Amino acid sequence: MRMAEAIKARRPGSTASRPTAHRTGRRCAEDGCSTVISRYNAADHCYRHAPRVFPRLRGVFLES
């Protein structure tokens, strides 16, 4: 078999690229918080100090 006829494959469910890694040892941006942020977390704040984001609601509001 020639190389041109070979088949390339990946495991099912795997991605082609690696996850983005950020600088290690980053700390939460909140004053007085010493939480170390994961290298895979792009946020500047830890979970406790992250700004709250509410999902966009769609549909009809039901009267209670």
Image (tube, rainbow, N blue to C red):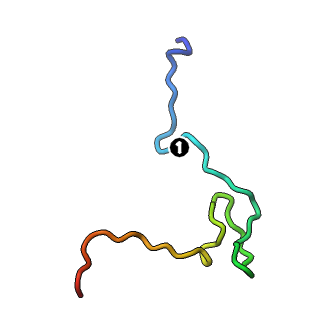
Which residue is at the front of the view, 18 or 50? 50
What amino acid type is highlighted by mark number 1? Answer: Thr
Q: Badge 1, how many Cα within 10 Å: few under 14, some, many 20+?
A: few
Which residue is at the front of the view, 22 or 2? 22
Q: Residue at x 52, y 27 (%)?
A: 8
Report whether 20 appears left or right of 31: left
Q: Position of residue 51 (x, y in %)?
A: 56, 75
Which residue is at the front of the view, 11 or 43? 43
Q: Position of residue 55 (x, y in %)?
A: 42, 70
Quarter of the picture holding the C terminus: bottom left
Q: Residue at x 72, y 69 (%)?
A: 36
Q: Is residue 7 above or below residue 34?
A: above
Corner quadrant of residue 3: top right
Q: Residue furthest right?
A: 25
Report whether 15 appears left or right of 63: right
Q: Residue at x 54, y 11 (%)?
A: 2
Q: Residue at x 45, y 73 (%)?
A: 54
Which residue is at the front of the view, 25 or 4? 25
Disc 1: which residue: 15
